Image: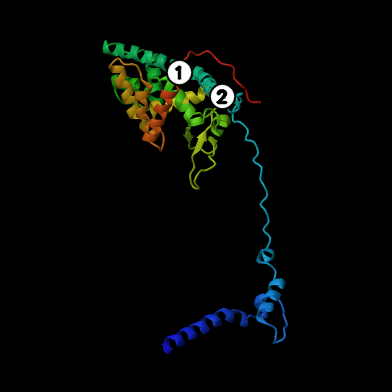
Amino acid sequence: MKSTQLIKLVLSLVVTLAMIAPFTFLKEDIVATTVELPSTTPLEPLGKEIALKVKPLATMAPRTKSKPVVKKLPENPLHQMTLPDFAAISDTKQKKKHFFNYMKPAVNKQNQHLLAQRAKLLQWLDKINQKHTLTKQEQQALAQLTSKYKVKKHASVLVQLHELLLRVDIVPMPLVLVQAANESAWGTSRFSRIGLNFFGIWCYTPGCGMVPNGRTEGDKHEVAAFKSLDDAVAHYLYNINSNKAYRVFRTIRAELREQGHELSAEILATGLLPYSERGADYVIEITNMLRHNRQYLTENNDRQPIIVAE
């Protein structure tokens, strides 16, 4: 019993010493002040004296200079066109109408151009099937198309024509419009405003377009810039019709043609897996946009009043 009381007493003394010890060994350089006290001064006033004379840590910390605010200068457009100010249209339905109506004429123009070229190819194919030869002018035109669409120049004329018919064809208007809306944030993105790039098309020659703000160090790609909306749409269609990545898209389109079906935007969208790093998620998003915007995509081409950026 006595031993238990003794242990408790020792522990009490140890705790008391532990609490007093930090104060008994305080030095002048630690508290950054000089305090002279008589030996009879109680411990508590010493703590108060020190607390009054030591500056708070916050006031002793070095002042940090605030970084100057750098204003971003407006980026000059790389084209001479006056674009609608889609960002100024607050009503979602009106914005969609204005955007689609702005894009439709250029898409229609380039698709009609492709259909005219396709009609010639079909005429030439018919001549070959009937054992006729192409005229010199037709041969030159065929050579230009095989070069443009990367068809083997040493292949037979028949093979060249079949290969070109896989490539020289339209992309349905709704699919082009929805991709443009998706890639350009409904015409409000930097790339669409500055470079008329509504389709997120890259290029790899220095100075060919705009450098992405978030480009990884070491990367050399730029986002292509175009001089007109016609050029932008034509390049998009050419990319779909010539790039190896979209071979599946072109195969699906050819199958639809072969079976006499219309070129369904929803079906063809499944051939756009390589268009984005998001893959299937991107395709699902495009098909959802096709469904949700059907009422705007099937309307006639009557132009709506458009707000123009100053």
Residue 136, quarter of the rendered image: top left
67, above or below 179, in the image: below
* Disc on res. 91: 2
57, above or below 237, in the image: below
Residue at the farthest bottom position: 2
Please tell me which residue lies in front, 60 or 110: 60
- In the image, is 159 to the left or to the right of 209? left
**Few, some or many residues within 10 Å of mark 2 (<14, 14–19, 20+):** few
**Few, some or many residues within 10 Å of mark 1 (<14, 14–19, 20+):** few
Q: In the rendering, at what x and y percent does residue 270 appear?
A: 35, 28
Of helix, strand and loop, which one carries label 2? loop
Q: In the rendering, at what x and y percent does residue 165 appear?
A: 34, 20
What residue is at 72 percent from the left and 80 percent from the top? 35
20, above or below 72, in the image: below
* Disc on res. 295: 1
**Is residue 110 in view?**
no
Q: In the rendering, at what x and y percent does residue 22 appear?
A: 59, 79
What residue is at 66 percent from the left and 66 percent from the top? 57
**Quadrant location of the N terminus in the rendered image:** bottom left
140, above or below 21, in the image: above
Amino acid, disc 2: Asp
